[in-house]
Each structure stands twice: as structure tokens, then as C-alpha cells.
Image (spheres, grey):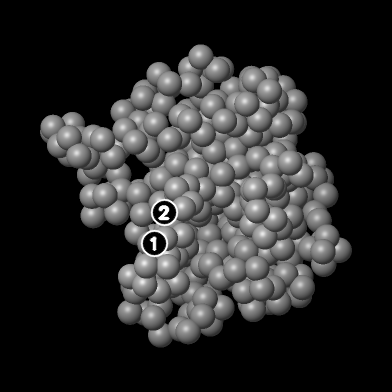
Amino acid sequence: MSKDPYILAVNPGSTSTKFAIFQGERLIFKESIKHKDEELSRFSTVANQLDYRFNLLTKELDKHQFSLGQLKAVVGRGGFVKPLPSGTYLIDEAMIEHVKTAKYGEHASNLGPMIAYKLSKHLKIPAYIVDPVVVDELEDVARLSGIPELERKSHVHALNIKAVSRTVAEQLGKKYNEYNFVVAHLGGGISVVAHRKGRIVDVNNANNEGPYSPERAGGLPAFQLVQLCYSRRYTEKEMLTKLAKEGGFYAYLGTRNAMQVEEQAKKGDKRAKLVLDGMIYQVAKEIGAMAAVLDGEVDGIILTGGLSYSEYIVQKVKKKVAFISSIYVVPGEEELEALAHGALRIINGKEQAIKYSESI
């Protein structure tokens, strides 16, 4: 009988709670609990959703007749904690206080550590987060924006970017921290990073810089943005929503569905094709910029995220950036797997867990 440990991975999103049970690296089962807007609207803050989501999760686990007593560890998607280097962090009271009060920002992923910690306290097992969205390994020069009050921040799809970088490094036959990669995570938000010897040394903040995406506006002309903000047409909240949720494809075409936009483009819709090609154009420009950050010493360009399933998008990006380096496509977001693998590296002694309270 296998002695590989059982691990529960939990990934809360804005409208779903995804979870999976792994035995070692082997997936046992995976589920996604959908949440209706009217259900979540009952809660004034993300933190107030804890008991609601926790109870749904344990009920689903019961349906699979999985005994929680078998678990060796539980790992949650890391939310907006204090900016940290990448790694696997032991969840403690300090982290829970920060996500509960949304000290560094409110997001559904803040529930990842909260759910994991609540379950771990009951089972008396360790709880971890892995490579949260606030992973910050920027070089000092990358923090400068041109205005001291506006320091550039690292908000990045670190979990998936680190995971696919390890995958490609393994394929190439060396250790993960021996390579320089430019990695483009293409999804609802887009992160393009310069990945030097295992560290993300620069990235467009996926919420407000870089390429536009199916719903995010990306980098904008600063003067015109300021004028729009002071035009009295929108409140501050409306402007922030416009930038993060109603930009990109949605702003131009009224849809966030990239497959739909691509189909319209293929059927001859010139507007849809222009908007789709515009995003690809900006992604390619950002890849070129990150190659410059690495002084042109690029061992590979990695395309990942949900949009990397599109042959049209991938081929168009390849055409523009293939002169820089070899291109590797790892489509999708295997975030639950990445969470479980992070916890497994700790259990197997390949890495040391970092205590959050000590890191701050």
C-alpha cells in the first residue's frame, strides 16, 4: 500500500471554491463548488464568507466518503498577505489576522489561508500557502515608476508561473534556478515576467499594467486617464471597476469570452479581429521588454494560462517573439496541483517551510 501522504488543496475564487485531494503527486479527485452572486451578496466582506464556504467544502468531501483524518497537510491558495519572496509558508495567526482584516487588500483568495487554517486546527495538522499573488522578488530598479508616490508593485500569477517554470526546467534537464525564462501567463489577467535564476525580477502588475486582457484595461495613457478620472463621469469605485473588470475585450466588444471573440474574428468580424490582435501585439511587446530586462539572456519563453489553449493566439505570439528564444507552451492553470506539490516538497524534506510571522 502506498505511503504517499494525503494532501487537501483549496483554491477559492470570486465565484467558486475549487479543491482536490492528492496522494503524493497523484490526483485522487477534484471538484469545483459554484457560488451564485445572490448567495455571496449576503456577506459584507470576503472574510465573512469563511463559514459558508468551509461548510460547503466539508459537505463535498463527505460526499466522496473521504476521511479527513487521513490528511497529512492542507494547503490553500495564498491571498493578499504581506509581499514576500516565493516559497511555501506555514499559516499562523499573524497571516490569518492580515487576510481577515484585508490589511494588504481584499480578494477571494484571502479565504485560502483561512479555510486551510480552520481545518488544520481541527485536525491538528500543518497548513500552508504556496507562492501567493503578492510574491515580490523585484529588483530595486524595477520598483521605480517615475513618480516616488507611485512605486511599482508585484501582483503576479506566481503560483502557476513558478510551477510551469519548474516543469520546463525539468524538461530541459537542469535545475529550476539555473535558467532565465520570460513567462507569459495569459488569462482573465495577464502577467508577463522576467524570471532570472528562479526569481521573478520584474513583472507587469496584472491589475493595472501591461497588456489588456479579456476584462482588464492594462497600461493606459496617463494624461488621458487622469483627465477621465476628473471628468466627473465616474466615481472612484466605478473607475477601479472599469480598469480591473470592464476593460479589454469587455470594453471594446461587450464580452469577456475570448473564445467567442476569436470565433467572431474567424468569421470576418474586423472589429473583433483588431481587438484580439491588439492584445496579442501588447503581449509580444511585453515579452520583448522582459527579454531586455534579462539582457537578452533568455533560455526560453513560456506561454501559459487559459488563453494559451488558443492556437491562433499562440501562433501569432510565436511569430513576433520567436527570434528571442525557444518557445514552450504549457496551457491552462494547474494551480491545485501546484499547491499540493508545494506542500509535498515540505513533507518530503526537499524544502523548508517559512514561518510567516518570522518573515514579517
Between the C-alphas of marks 1 and 2, the distance is: 6 Å
Residue 224, which numbered label? 2
Q: Secondary structure at mark 1?
A: helix
In the image, residue 244 above or below residue 266: below
Q: Residues within 10 Å of mark 2 (few under 14, many from 20)?
A: few
Which quarter of the rendered picture does the C terminus lie within?
bottom right
Query: Where's residue 256, x and y in %?
Result: 30, 52
Residue found at x 40% / y 19%: 319
Q: Residue furthest right?
A: 358
| Left or right: where 140 falls relative to 235 | right
Residue 71: x %, y % from top left:
66, 61
Q: Position of residue 24 (x, y in %)?
A: 64, 46
Q: Amino acid at mark 1?
A: Leu
Q: Residue at x 26, y 35 (%)?
A: 274
- Residue 88 seen in render: no
Residue found at x 69% / y 47%: 144
Can you say whether 295 is above or below 6 in the image? above
Which numbered marker is on residue 228?
Answer: 1
Question: What is the secondary structure assignment of the residue under circle 2?
Answer: helix
Query: Nearest the camera: 298 or 114?
Result: 298
Q: Which mark is residue 104?
A: none
Q: Is residue 36 above or below residue 264?
A: below
The answer to whether the residues at label 1 and label 2 have Cβ atoms under 8 Å apart is yes
Label 2 sits on what residue type? Gln
Would you say 134 lies left or right of 249 here? right
Q: Along the line of sight, which residue is nearer the eye, 178 or 340? A: 178
